[in-house]
Amino acid sequence: MIRKLFTLYYALFFGDISGLWGKNVAEYLLGSRIVKKGDSVISFFTPRGPIFAGYLIKNKIKCDWIVDFQDNHDIGQKYKFLSRYWMKRVLKNADKCVHVSPEWAEKDGEKLGKSFMVIRHALPKKEHIVSLFGEEEFTFFYYGGFNVDYQYHEFFFKYLNDNPETKFAYAGFEQVDQIFSSKLNSDQYIYLGWLSSYELFDQLSRAKFVVVFGFTLASRSVVPSKLYELIALKIPIIIIGNDSGGIKDLENETSFMFSWAKNEKQLQAIVDSPQMINQDYSAFDIYNQDSFINNYLNILEPNDN
Protein backbone atom coordinates (compact mmCIF):
# COMPACT_ATOMS: atom_id res chain seq x y z
CA MET A 1 0.00 0.00 0.00
CA ILE A 2 2.83 2.41 0.92
CA ARG A 3 4.66 1.63 -2.32
CA LYS A 4 1.47 2.35 -4.29
CA LEU A 5 1.08 5.72 -2.56
CA PHE A 6 4.70 6.64 -3.36
CA THR A 7 4.17 5.64 -7.00
CA LEU A 8 1.06 7.81 -7.22
CA TYR A 9 2.90 10.71 -5.55
CA TYR A 10 5.84 10.58 -7.97
CA ALA A 11 3.53 10.19 -10.97
CA LEU A 12 1.47 13.22 -9.96
CA PHE A 13 4.26 15.65 -9.04
CA PHE A 14 7.40 14.41 -10.81
CA GLY A 15 6.13 12.30 -13.72
CA ASP A 16 7.83 9.25 -12.20
CA ILE A 17 10.68 8.60 -9.79
CA SER A 18 13.22 9.81 -12.38
CA GLY A 19 11.74 13.26 -11.79
CA LEU A 20 13.80 13.44 -8.58
CA TRP A 21 16.91 13.13 -10.73
CA GLY A 22 15.47 15.80 -13.04
CA LYS A 23 14.96 18.14 -10.08
CA ASN A 24 18.58 17.71 -8.99
CA VAL A 25 19.83 18.25 -12.56
CA ALA A 26 17.81 21.47 -12.91
CA GLU A 27 19.12 22.80 -9.58
CA TYR A 28 22.71 22.02 -10.57
CA LEU A 29 22.46 23.56 -14.05
CA LEU A 30 20.78 26.70 -12.73
CA GLY A 31 22.98 27.02 -9.66
CA SER A 32 26.19 26.74 -11.67
CA ARG A 33 24.79 28.99 -14.43
CA ILE A 34 25.55 26.38 -17.08
CA VAL A 35 22.19 27.31 -18.63
CA LYS A 36 20.96 30.89 -18.76
CA LYS A 37 18.36 33.03 -20.46
CA GLY A 38 18.80 32.96 -24.21
CA ASP A 39 19.84 29.30 -24.27
CA SER A 40 17.76 26.48 -25.75
CA VAL A 41 17.10 23.44 -23.59
CA ILE A 42 16.13 20.08 -25.10
CA SER A 43 14.55 17.37 -22.96
CA PHE A 44 14.70 13.83 -24.37
CA PHE A 45 11.97 11.40 -23.31
CA THR A 46 12.16 8.60 -22.00
CA PRO A 47 12.35 8.73 -18.99
CA ARG A 48 10.34 11.63 -17.59
CA GLY A 49 13.20 13.06 -15.53
CA PRO A 50 14.68 15.11 -18.41
CA ILE A 51 11.23 16.60 -19.10
CA PHE A 52 10.86 17.63 -15.48
CA ALA A 53 14.35 19.16 -15.52
CA GLY A 54 13.53 21.17 -18.65
CA TYR A 55 10.20 22.22 -17.16
CA LEU A 56 11.86 23.61 -14.02
CA ILE A 57 14.57 25.40 -16.01
CA LYS A 58 12.00 26.89 -18.38
CA ASN A 59 9.96 28.22 -15.46
CA LYS A 60 13.02 29.75 -13.84
CA ILE A 61 14.81 31.53 -16.71
CA LYS A 62 12.19 31.57 -19.54
CA CYS A 63 14.54 29.92 -22.06
CA ASP A 64 13.39 28.16 -25.24
CA TRP A 65 12.36 24.64 -24.26
CA ILE A 66 12.01 21.75 -26.71
CA VAL A 67 10.76 18.29 -25.74
CA ASP A 68 11.86 15.39 -27.94
CA PHE A 69 9.76 12.21 -27.60
CA GLN A 70 11.48 8.91 -28.39
CA ASP A 71 8.45 6.90 -27.27
CA ASN A 72 4.73 7.33 -26.67
CA HIS A 73 3.88 9.57 -23.75
CA ASP A 74 2.55 6.96 -21.29
CA ILE A 75 5.17 4.25 -21.85
CA GLY A 76 6.22 2.55 -18.62
CA GLN A 77 3.55 4.30 -16.56
CA LYS A 78 1.09 2.08 -14.72
CA TYR A 79 -1.33 4.93 -14.00
CA LYS A 80 -2.02 6.20 -17.51
CA PHE A 81 -4.47 8.92 -16.44
CA LEU A 82 -1.87 10.45 -14.12
CA SER A 83 0.77 10.29 -16.84
CA ARG A 84 -1.51 12.16 -19.22
CA TYR A 85 -2.45 14.75 -16.60
CA TRP A 86 1.20 15.37 -15.70
CA MET A 87 2.33 15.55 -19.33
CA LYS A 88 -0.42 17.97 -20.33
CA ARG A 89 0.43 20.22 -17.38
CA VAL A 90 4.17 20.46 -17.99
CA LEU A 91 4.00 20.57 -21.79
CA LYS A 92 1.93 23.74 -21.69
CA ASN A 93 5.23 25.53 -21.11
CA ALA A 94 7.10 23.75 -23.94
CA ASP A 95 7.88 25.96 -26.94
CA LYS A 96 8.09 23.03 -29.35
CA CYS A 97 7.54 19.30 -29.21
CA VAL A 98 9.22 16.76 -31.48
CA HIS A 99 8.37 13.10 -32.05
CA VAL A 100 10.41 10.34 -33.65
CA SER A 101 7.27 8.65 -34.96
CA PRO A 102 4.57 10.26 -37.14
CA GLU A 103 2.08 7.72 -35.79
CA TRP A 104 2.80 8.59 -32.16
CA ALA A 105 2.98 12.29 -33.00
CA GLU A 106 -0.63 12.17 -34.16
CA LYS A 107 -1.90 10.06 -31.25
CA ASP A 108 0.01 11.87 -28.51
CA GLY A 109 -0.92 15.21 -30.06
CA GLU A 110 -4.61 14.37 -29.71
CA LYS A 111 -4.24 13.06 -26.15
CA LEU A 112 -2.01 15.86 -24.87
CA GLY A 113 -3.47 18.77 -26.82
CA LYS A 114 -0.06 19.62 -28.25
CA SER A 115 1.23 19.93 -31.81
CA PHE A 116 4.22 17.71 -32.59
CA MET A 117 6.84 18.07 -35.30
CA VAL A 118 8.28 14.79 -36.65
CA ILE A 119 11.97 14.01 -37.07
CA ARG A 120 12.74 10.36 -37.70
CA HIS A 121 15.90 8.69 -36.43
CA ALA A 122 19.07 9.50 -38.33
CA LEU A 123 21.01 6.63 -39.85
CA PRO A 124 24.23 6.20 -37.88
CA LYS A 125 27.40 6.50 -39.93
CA LYS A 126 28.62 2.92 -40.11
CA GLU A 127 30.43 0.88 -42.69
CA HIS A 128 29.07 -2.38 -44.02
CA ILE A 129 30.33 -5.01 -41.60
CA VAL A 130 32.48 -7.81 -42.94
CA SER A 131 32.60 -11.18 -41.23
CA LEU A 132 35.73 -11.71 -39.19
CA PHE A 133 35.01 -15.41 -38.99
CA GLY A 134 34.93 -16.40 -42.66
CA GLU A 135 31.65 -18.30 -42.59
CA GLU A 136 28.27 -17.56 -41.04
CA GLU A 137 27.61 -19.24 -37.73
CA PHE A 138 23.99 -18.23 -37.03
CA THR A 139 21.04 -18.47 -39.38
CA PHE A 140 19.08 -15.86 -37.42
CA PHE A 141 20.15 -13.15 -35.03
CA TYR A 142 18.12 -10.81 -32.83
CA TYR A 143 19.07 -8.22 -30.23
CA GLY A 144 17.29 -5.83 -27.88
CA GLY A 145 13.91 -5.93 -26.18
CA PHE A 146 11.07 -8.34 -26.86
CA ASN A 147 7.52 -8.60 -25.56
CA VAL A 148 5.76 -11.92 -25.95
CA ASP A 149 2.35 -10.25 -25.67
CA TYR A 150 2.61 -7.75 -28.51
CA GLN A 151 5.24 -8.95 -30.96
CA TYR A 152 4.73 -11.62 -33.62
CA HIS A 153 6.77 -14.73 -32.87
CA GLU A 154 4.80 -17.99 -32.69
CA PHE A 155 5.35 -19.26 -36.24
CA PHE A 156 9.01 -18.21 -36.08
CA PHE A 157 9.71 -20.41 -33.07
CA LYS A 158 7.67 -23.24 -34.57
CA TYR A 159 9.89 -22.99 -37.65
CA LEU A 160 12.98 -23.21 -35.46
CA ASN A 161 11.61 -26.22 -33.60
CA ASP A 162 10.81 -27.92 -36.90
CA ASN A 163 14.35 -27.19 -38.16
CA PRO A 164 16.64 -28.04 -35.23
CA GLU A 165 19.77 -27.57 -37.34
CA THR A 166 18.93 -23.86 -37.65
CA LYS A 167 20.92 -21.66 -35.26
CA PHE A 168 19.34 -18.64 -33.53
CA ALA A 169 21.45 -16.20 -31.51
CA TYR A 170 20.20 -13.47 -29.18
CA ALA A 171 21.99 -10.59 -27.47
CA GLY A 172 20.34 -8.49 -24.79
CA PHE A 173 18.21 -8.82 -21.69
CA GLU A 174 18.21 -11.85 -19.39
CA GLN A 175 14.41 -11.69 -19.20
CA VAL A 176 14.17 -12.11 -22.98
CA ASP A 177 16.72 -14.92 -22.85
CA GLN A 178 14.44 -16.75 -20.43
CA ILE A 179 11.57 -16.50 -22.92
CA PHE A 180 13.65 -17.70 -25.87
CA SER A 181 15.39 -20.50 -23.97
CA SER A 182 12.02 -21.85 -22.84
CA LYS A 183 10.87 -22.15 -26.46
CA LEU A 184 14.02 -23.57 -28.08
CA ASN A 185 16.43 -26.43 -27.48
CA SER A 186 19.89 -25.62 -26.20
CA ASP A 187 21.61 -27.04 -29.28
CA GLN A 188 20.23 -24.39 -31.59
CA TYR A 189 19.78 -21.37 -29.30
CA ILE A 190 22.78 -19.22 -28.31
CA TYR A 191 22.49 -16.47 -25.72
CA LEU A 192 25.31 -13.97 -26.07
CA GLY A 193 24.50 -11.78 -23.07
CA TRP A 194 24.62 -7.99 -23.08
CA LEU A 195 27.14 -6.78 -25.65
CA SER A 196 28.96 -3.52 -26.24
CA SER A 197 28.46 -1.88 -29.65
CA TYR A 198 31.76 -3.28 -30.90
CA GLU A 199 30.93 -6.78 -29.66
CA LEU A 200 27.44 -6.55 -31.14
CA PHE A 201 28.69 -5.62 -34.62
CA ASP A 202 31.26 -8.40 -34.36
CA GLN A 203 28.49 -10.94 -33.69
CA LEU A 204 26.19 -9.48 -36.34
CA SER A 205 28.82 -10.33 -38.92
CA ARG A 206 28.30 -14.00 -38.10
CA ALA A 207 24.58 -14.01 -38.93
CA LYS A 208 22.96 -14.85 -42.23
CA PHE A 209 19.82 -12.88 -41.35
CA VAL A 210 18.83 -10.42 -38.63
CA VAL A 211 15.17 -10.61 -37.63
CA VAL A 212 12.91 -7.79 -36.45
CA PHE A 213 9.69 -8.86 -34.74
CA GLY A 214 6.66 -6.85 -35.88
CA PHE A 215 4.28 -5.30 -33.36
CA THR A 216 0.72 -6.54 -32.95
CA LEU A 217 -0.69 -3.59 -30.99
CA ALA A 218 -2.01 -0.51 -32.77
CA SER A 219 -0.50 1.57 -29.96
CA ARG A 220 2.96 0.31 -31.01
CA SER A 221 2.69 1.49 -34.62
CA VAL A 222 6.28 2.62 -34.74
CA VAL A 223 9.57 1.76 -36.43
CA PRO A 224 11.97 -0.04 -34.05
CA SER A 225 15.09 2.10 -33.70
CA LYS A 226 17.31 -0.93 -34.36
CA LEU A 227 15.96 -1.01 -37.92
CA TYR A 228 17.79 2.22 -38.77
CA GLU A 229 21.01 0.78 -37.37
CA LEU A 230 20.67 -2.42 -39.39
CA ILE A 231 20.00 -0.42 -42.54
CA ALA A 232 23.15 1.61 -41.93
CA LEU A 233 25.11 -1.62 -41.57
CA LYS A 234 23.59 -3.00 -44.81
CA ILE A 235 22.54 -6.22 -43.11
CA PRO A 236 19.93 -8.67 -44.53
CA ILE A 237 16.75 -7.99 -42.55
CA ILE A 238 13.63 -10.15 -42.21
CA ILE A 239 10.50 -8.64 -40.65
CA ILE A 240 8.76 -11.39 -38.67
CA GLY A 241 4.96 -11.36 -38.78
CA ASN A 242 2.84 -8.39 -39.68
CA ASP A 243 3.10 -4.79 -38.56
CA SER A 244 0.80 -2.40 -36.75
CA GLY A 245 1.60 0.42 -39.16
CA GLY A 246 4.99 2.02 -38.53
CA ILE A 247 7.18 -0.06 -40.84
CA LYS A 248 4.59 0.03 -43.62
CA ASP A 249 4.44 3.82 -43.36
CA LEU A 250 8.23 3.90 -43.67
CA GLU A 251 7.96 1.76 -46.81
CA ASN A 252 5.45 4.19 -48.30
CA GLU A 253 7.68 7.12 -47.37
CA THR A 254 10.78 5.66 -49.04
CA SER A 255 9.26 3.35 -51.72
CA PHE A 256 11.43 0.60 -50.25
CA MET A 257 10.06 -2.89 -49.65
CA PHE A 258 11.39 -4.93 -46.74
CA SER A 259 11.41 -8.72 -46.76
CA TRP A 260 8.42 -9.94 -44.75
CA ALA A 261 7.89 -13.44 -43.39
CA LYS A 262 4.31 -13.75 -42.20
CA ASN A 263 4.31 -17.55 -41.93
CA GLU A 264 6.66 -20.53 -41.99
CA LYS A 265 6.36 -20.99 -45.74
CA GLN A 266 7.47 -17.42 -46.47
CA LEU A 267 10.30 -17.70 -43.97
CA GLN A 268 11.54 -20.91 -45.60
CA ALA A 269 11.41 -19.29 -49.04
CA ILE A 270 13.70 -16.47 -47.84
CA VAL A 271 16.10 -18.91 -46.17
CA ASP A 272 16.27 -20.94 -49.39
CA SER A 273 16.72 -17.84 -51.58
CA PRO A 274 18.48 -15.13 -49.55
CA GLN A 275 18.91 -13.07 -52.72
CA MET A 276 15.21 -12.22 -52.30
CA ILE A 277 16.22 -9.68 -49.64
CA ASN A 278 16.66 -6.18 -50.97
CA GLN A 279 19.89 -4.77 -49.51
CA ASP A 280 19.96 -1.63 -51.63
CA TYR A 281 19.18 0.77 -48.80
CA SER A 282 19.97 3.94 -50.77
CA ALA A 283 16.31 5.00 -50.40
CA PHE A 284 17.10 5.75 -46.75
CA ASP A 285 19.82 8.28 -47.54
CA ILE A 286 17.21 10.97 -46.85
CA TYR A 287 17.61 10.11 -43.15
CA ASN A 288 21.31 10.92 -43.07
CA GLN A 289 22.80 12.77 -40.13
CA ASP A 290 23.29 16.04 -42.01
CA SER A 291 19.56 16.13 -42.81
CA PHE A 292 18.75 15.36 -39.18
CA ILE A 293 20.99 18.19 -37.96
CA ASN A 294 19.47 20.67 -40.42
CA ASN A 295 15.97 19.73 -39.25
CA TYR A 296 16.98 20.31 -35.66
CA LEU A 297 18.65 23.62 -36.45
CA ASN A 298 15.35 24.77 -37.96
CA ILE A 299 13.55 23.74 -34.78
CA LEU A 300 16.08 25.57 -32.62
CA GLU A 301 15.36 28.87 -34.32
CA PRO A 302 13.75 31.12 -31.69
CA ASN A 303 10.02 31.66 -31.69
CA ASP A 304 8.66 34.87 -33.19
CA ASN A 305 6.48 35.58 -30.18
Image (cartoon, rainbow, N blue to C red):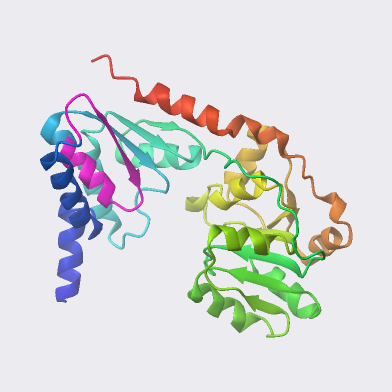
Residue sitting at x 57%, y 42%: 124
Say if the magenta span includes residue 37.
yes
| Residue 118, position as x, y percentages in the image | 46, 33
| Residue 243, position as x, y percentages in the image | 62, 52
Q: Magenta residues?
A: 35-57
Say if the magenta span includes residue 74.
no
Instruction: Decide if residue 258 is on the left or right side of residue 272.
Output: left
| Residue 119, position as x, y percentages in the image | 48, 33
Residue lying furthest bottom: 186
Instruction: Locate the N terminus by quadrant.
Output: bottom left
How many numbered circles does the render carry?
0
Residue lying furthest front: 132
Q: Is 98 located above or below residue 229 in the figure? A: above
Q: Is residue 292 visible?
A: yes
Q: Is 135 located above or below residue 11 in the figure? A: below
Res. 267 image quadrant: bottom right
Residue sitting at x 67%, y 39%: 251
Instruction: Decide if residue 69 is on the left or right side of residue 92.
Output: right
Instruction: Decide if residue 57 is on the left or right side of residue 107.
Output: left
> Is 296 in front, or is 159?
296
| Residue 229, position as x, y percentages in the image | 60, 48
Residue sitting at x 53%, y 47%: 222
Instruction: Decide if residue 52 is on the left or right side of residue 170.
Output: left
Residue sitting at x 47%, y 40%: 100
Q: Is residue 224 visible?
A: no
Q: Is 77 located above or below residue 154 in the figure? A: above
